[in-house]
Amino acid sequence: MAMSQRAFITLLILMAVLVALSATSFLGAMIGFLFGIAIAFFVAGPVMLIGKVLEKNGIAISGQTALWVLAGFYALLILAAAFQIWRRLQRHEPDQARSAGMRLALLVALPAMAWLSVNAMQDAWP
């Protein structure tokens, strides 16, 4: 999908606004609650199932180890997105490079939004 420079800048500004709103007391708490639900269903469930399968096969894995493995996979996603930008810039495809740049910005913004919104949620609900 090709992305114009105007759309790229507009989406970056909107993403920055969303990250900033994640730190507010009301919207940040709501976003934090939604991140919690998403993590509970889409991350914790599959990780628990994989942990049970590994445990049945004699490979015990702790929760901290599972978090490090997930963080490593996420870091690989970020590196792959950055490599994709570099490759598309080398091929002189600026529209596709901007599209890949938006994916990279989203991959970087999601953990920041999660951290800010979970902190806002903890502050809003004593």
Image: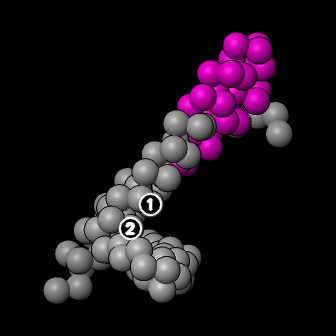
x and y, in percent, of residue 14 in the image: 55, 48
Kind of element beneath mark 2:
helix
Give the magenta part as a residue range.
82-109
Per the image, the residue denoted by label 2 is 66
Query: With respect to residue 27, does 101 lie above or below?
Result: above
Q: Quadrant of the N terminus?
A: top right
Compared across the picture, whether 116 is left or right of 79 comes to: left
25 up-or-down from 7: above or below: below
Q: Amino acid at mark 1?
A: Leu
- Could you classify mark 2 by the number of other residues whose Cα lies within 10 Å: few (under 14), some (14-19), or many (20 or more)? some
Query: What residue is rendered at 67% in x and 36% in y?
Result: 100
Q: Quadrant of residue 118?
A: bottom left
As helix, strand or loop, the secondary structure at mark 1 comes to helix
Given the current orientation, which residue lies at the most extreme front position?
58
**Is there any visible trace of residue 40 in the rendered image?**
no
Question: Relative to residue 114, is residue 49 drawn left or right?
Answer: right
Q: Is residue 83 above or below residue 63?
A: above
Residue 55 sits above or below residue 20 on the image: below
Measured as percent of width and height from the top left, residue 86 is found at 62, 21
Name of the residue lying farthest toward the left: 126
Is residue 115 shown left or right of residue 73? left
Q: At 60% from the left edge and 37% from the top edge, which residue is drawn?
A: 81
Cα gap from disc 2 to disc 1, whole angstroms: 6 Å
Q: Please name the residue shown 72% across and 22% down the image.
A: 88
Circles 2 and 1: CB distance less than 8 Å?
Answer: yes
Q: Which residue is mark 1?
A: 70
Is 80 or 2 nearer to us in this picture? 80
Tell me, yes or no, whether the highlighted magenta stretch contains residue 120. no
**Colouring convention used in this rendered image of the protein:** one colour
Amino acid type assigned to the residue bearing label 2 in the image: Ala
Q: Quadrant of the C terminus?
A: bottom left
